[in-house]
Amino acid sequence: MNKLTSTHRPVIHDQSVPTLSIVVPMFNEEDVLPILFERLGTYLDDLGESYEIICVNDGSTDRTADLLNDAHQRDNRIKVLNFSRNFGKEIALTAGLDVAKGQAVVPIDADLQDPPELIEAFLEKWREGFDVVYAVRRQRDSDTAMKRWSAAKFYQVINRLSGVPIPANTGDYRLMDQRVVRAIVQLREQNRFMKGLFAWVGFRHAHVAYDRPKRAAGETKFNYWRLWNFALDGITGFSTVPLRIAGYIGILTALAAIVYGLFLMLRTMIHGVDVPGYASLMVAVLLIGGLQLVVLGVIGEYLGRLYEESRNRPLYIVESSHGIEPDEDANT
């Protein structure tokens, strides 16, 4: 039977392949780790599915690495990758996907704002034949009004600019079939916007709605500056429309300058030469100069990303691991 119309997943008899791989990127999460392992481990044990938990320590400077090592010693289903420095959440998530072996893979935030209790609903949809099941936030009361407004506007903008629709009010929390993961890990660009990559690979998808709770402990690592850069990576990574807009601005400015020049010529021919206005001259110079800088800035963003890609550096460097033997070529 065709997989897309099948209501059941094929049974894999290899006992070394767990049903679930839970991928948890983390940076300085020592306050929340005991709560995370207690709640997530208890839930997964009650669920009755075989699983592994892959913790990617993104260069934490607190006791996160020590706590992860202790957790692995207690339960070898908890596996750890320690980065040599902080590479960012998107890269940490990529590293977890690189080594995930489960039939289905679930990225989840360490702060428990992604409630593990949704995994059962994910599995039900997955076993119906959906390759991707993503969580949609019904409400975001834990976020500030400014953050909710900016998130809504971001999704509106990127879905207008990008040829790949990205579901609004979604994060990284979702279940992906292993074949979806295999497709994603082939995409090795340096500036990674994972929500866009998840959407770009396609496949059959469904969603589950939920109410996003507050952090279980600790503080968020995302401030507005980091969110702005995150949005910029998303827009420039999945659309060249800003370059086109920059070109249109240049054309319109040039046309306006030509029209204004003709106007000055006609006025001089009719009324003769008058004393040139310093204010109007300065306004024109500053306007055109400002527009040129804006256009150059847009072009510079894309050129900078091309430069990053041309260096072909590895996405991340693993300092140590517990329970995982990472592929030497996986981080290229």
Image (cartoon, helix red, strand yellow):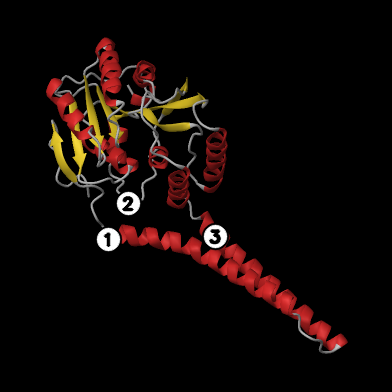
Do residues under tags 1 and 3 come within 8 Å of each other at their CB atoms?
no
Q: Which residue is mark 2?
A: 190
Q: Residue at x 27, y 10 (%)?
A: 46
Q: Which residue lies at the image location 23% right of the left edge and 30% below the top edge? A: 54
Instruction: Check disc 3 and give the amino acid type.
Output: Arg
Q: Position of residue 155 (x, y in %)?
A: 53, 39
Q: Position of residue 328 (x, y in %)?
A: 14, 45
The label number, if any, that marks residue 311 in the structure image: 1
User: Does residue 160 lie above or below 52 as drawn?
Assistant: below
**In this view of the protein, can residue 24 be seen by the observer?**
yes
Q: Crowding near pointer 2: few (<14 within 10 Å), some, many (20+)?
A: many
Q: Amino acid at mark 1?
A: Arg
Up the image or down, 248 lies above or below 280; here it is above
- Classify residue 108 as left or right of residue 320: right
Task: Tell me the quadrant of the picture where the N terminus can be found.
Answer: top left
- In percent of width and height, residue 319 lies at 16, 43
Hey, what amino acid is under mark 2? Gln
Q: Tag 3 or tag 1, which sits nearer the N-term?
A: 3
> Quadrant location of residue 146?
top right
Query: Marks 2 and 3: which is nearer the front?
Result: 2
Q: Quadrant of residue 127?
A: top left
State which tag comes first along the sequence, 1 or 2. Answer: 2
User: Do callouts 1 and 2 mark residues in contact (Cβ within 8 Å)?
Assistant: yes
- Tell me what residue is drawn at x 39 percent, y 44 percent: 193
The Cα atoms of the two marked residues, 1 and 3, are separated by: 26 Å
Circle 3: element type = helix
